[in-house]
Amino acid sequence: MTPEPARTSDSAAASGTARPLAPGRALDVDALIDDPRTRIVVCCGSGGVGKTTTAAAIGLRAAERGRKVVVLTIDPARRLAQSMGIDRLDNVPRRVKDVEGEGDGELHAMMLDMKRTFDEIVEAHADKERAAAILANPFYQSLSAGFAGTQEYMAMEKLGQLRSRDEWDLIVVDTPPSRSALDFLDAPKRLGSFLDGKLIRLLMAPAKVGGRAGMKFLNVGMSMMTGALGKLLGGPLLRDVQTFVAAMDTMFGGFRTRADATYRLLQAPGTAFLVVASPERDALREAAYFVERLAADDMPLAGLVLNRVHGSGAAHLSAERALAAAENLEESRIVDQGDGKVGDRNSPDNLLSPETSQPSEASQPSETSVPSEAPHETTTSDVAETTDTTDTSVEQLTAGLLRLHAERMRLLAREQRTRDRFTALHPEVAVAEVAALPGDVHDLAGLRAIGDRLAG
Amino acid sequence: MSRLQVVSGKGGTGKTTVAAALALALATEGKRTLLVEVEGRQGIAQLFETETLPYEERKIAVAPGGGEVYALAIDPELALLDYLQMFYKLGGAGRALKKLGAIDFATTIAPGLRDVLLTGKACEAVRRKDKSGRYAYDCVVMDAPPTGRITRFLNVNDEVAGLAKIGPIHNQAQAVMRVLKSPETAVHLVTLLEEMPVQETADGIAELRSARLPVGRVIVNMVRPALLDEAELELGLERTPRTAIARSLSAAGLGGARRGGSAERLVDPLLEQAAEYAERFALERGQRDVLREFGRPLHELPLLAGGMDLAGLYELATALRKQGIA
Ligand SMILES: Nc1ncnc2c1ncn2[C@@H]1O[C@H](COP(=O)(O)OP(=O)(O)OP(=O)(O)O)[C@@H](O)[C@H]1O
Ligand SMILES: Nc1ncnc2c1ncn2[C@@H]1O[C@H](COP(=O)(O)OP(=O)(O)OP(=O)(O)O)[C@@H](O)[C@H]1O
Ligand SMILES: [Mg+2]
Ligand SMILES: [Mg+2]
């Protein structure tokens, strides 16, 4: 009998997915969300890594542990939004049903509507007449839907609003898939520098001085500039822009003050940033950049959430050994059969690259569509029946299981390497690992599962 | 064959990678290709392992067939000054505008204007001809904004033509829209076999169609190889007794098959991994079925297990060519 390989740890065996943490510190998510001093959690990271999922899972977990939580999500997956009851875009938090836990925690959630948020600012800060003029201005209409960084401004604006309502003791904020790492941190500054700029004053000048875009009051230099602008934009558009800027004038100051206030709120001790990343080279490189930018901006980082990590309940069986064993089984099978026919469906080549009936084969010239899998389905039962009688099917299955395991172990090793590289660069950052679930996360049960893994 | 190939898709699905592979594939067919980047992220330079790209068309690769790939990272600010120079002879005034912050305004605060410049520059490259009247580039491939913004991005000139009803901007905007709405353009969408990107692809196709922008192909990226087929999965997960697997593992030299033996203890984790695999597999097949229903040509690119590098990029380009894309 071969000696028993040592188990890595009990918890690894029990969960089947966890694995020992490398040197870096472990992030204690429960301590973070249970601490009443934690008032804001911001989930940031590059695109598609699981920011929205993490934000929702943290919100749900905190609520089920007794806190009154609101989660601000941005573009959640449709089914996730539906399951939380926030698929209607009305820009206000909705109470999420079916939250469990014995405390009197509550979960509220909303999906950010940036145009609505922009409109609300206008309505709240300009008198009625002026607000109507702004909302009807064609320039505003095209601007409000797609401002560069509008999502970022509006997310920050909404965060400020939620915080000032003081109805929740924890606000969890999702962030937009930013073009560059910290657009949402830069947004308030960019707005500020624009408002400090001379352009805005120039644009406002004619409308202010001469009422309806009276160019004649401008001095020569200025009129040359507006002339250039007019030539570039066309007269009517320039007038739209000018009326817009003039109408927005009174609001701009307030806008900027609030953006600054929100920025300071983010730096406050009650705020905790979580950088979310997947264990891939690029995502972790971005994560390292986030960590550095947060530090440079004095933003309090709680830790890194390493999402969609793979594990194995049989991590002690190496890829090499699993492959050797699989080959062993296949060889013995060929000997058993006595003919060792090539092109057998179980030959290593066929196992590694999909069969012809697998539509994933990259080499097919599928101009119109991928071929259907019908032929595959017809053979399924044959195979099952004929192989029931012999041991070959079991061996072939076992070999398959071993190959699958070898692949998993290789993935594990790759993920571990990327992770180690990050830890070497930023040993100070606490890390929480979240195992990849086999399916998508689109309901409260899924969020709960993510929450459990987050908490370790 | 469309001369402007726009590559969009959900964030992180591989737009930049696929656009680069597509450019290489086209060049391998002998076509002089320009690969254009509009998001200012220097993704192309990273992928081709070259230094930061300036705002200048630069040769970055020569394909096996002799075709060349040029790259251009469009800088909205420089593109604006370019335009002022080219169309309005506003050199000096351009500098003055810059001092005033007008350029900042146009390129960062008002994305509409920014997008006008980006699409305008790309279309200029598509239409450009040399002295002998031949097109400067056979093909232009654009690494475009993600699905959520692509329709607005490509359609911005329509909006502009509506806002600026007269003047040079109006004319320019219409000229750009003529290219974008013609069969000269194809908008490809990159997706993964996952629910969200597939959903986003569906939404993207619908939006592009309603804006009458030409939808091209759907490219499924990072497709994992099938390691177990369905027959095996079914057998393994339902029919085969655990003891038989334990015996088989033991026969393969992995320890004792009896209860508590090391081969026996492998059975549960291995079956659990197979169950996870089966779930993914079923999910992916479902998503593939959804993609088929879009009625667009469907292509698949394999997941490169070792991560991306230049060699991997050439591998993807070859796969695209084999599938008749280039
Ligand atoms: N641990 C996990 N296991 C399995 N699937 C996951 C996990 N985390 C996230 N997902 C899935 O990955 C997809 C992307 O997740 P999510 O929407 O949270 O990412 P995101 O960072 O918010 O993306 P975006 O940048 O586009 O906003 C979703 O389909 C989600 O269900
Ligand atoms: N076929 C593939 N196999 C393995 N890795 C891939 C593949 N395609 C892309 N990648 C990797 O996936 C990541 C995302 O790819 P890429 O940057 O091309 O996506 P993108 O859609 O352009 O992202 P973004 O939305 O951030 O611009 C990169 O790390 C890239 O190297
Ligand atoms: Mg999200
Ligand atoms: Mg990209």
Image: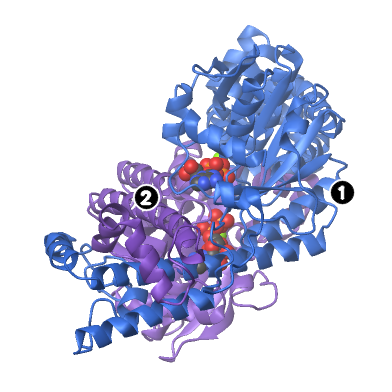
Which is more toward the observer, A319 or B177? A319
Task: Please give left or right for residue A194 compared with residue A13 in the image.
Answer: right
Chain in blue (letter): A
Provide residue A408's location: percent of width, then percent of height.
Answer: 50, 65
- Name the amino acid, label 1: Ala
Q: Residue at x 70, y 11 (%)?
A: A167
Q: Residue at x 33, y 47 (%)?
A: B205
Instruction: Check disc 2 and report the residue beneath it.
Output: B279
- Respond whether the residues carrying marks 1 and 2 are from the same subunit: no
Provide residue A5's location: percent of width, then percent of height.
Answer: 61, 67
**Vertical placement of residue B153 versus A381, above or below:** above
What shade does chain B have?
purple
Which is more toward the observer, B67 or A217? B67
Secondary structure category for the residue under label 1: helix
Provide residue A264's location: percent of width, then percent of height.
Answer: 85, 30
In which quarter of the view is residue A343 placed? Answer: bottom left
In which quarter of the view is residue B109 placed? Answer: top right
Quarter holding the C terminus of chain A?
top right
Labels 1, 2: front one = 2
Instruction: Check disc 1 and report the residue beneath it.
Output: A296
The chain letter for the residue carrying disc 2 is B
Disc 1 to disc 2, C-alpha distance:
43 Å
**Vertical placement of residue A278 versus B202, above or below:** below
**Residue B17 visible in the current orientation:** no
Q: Residue at x 64, y 32 (%)?
A: A58
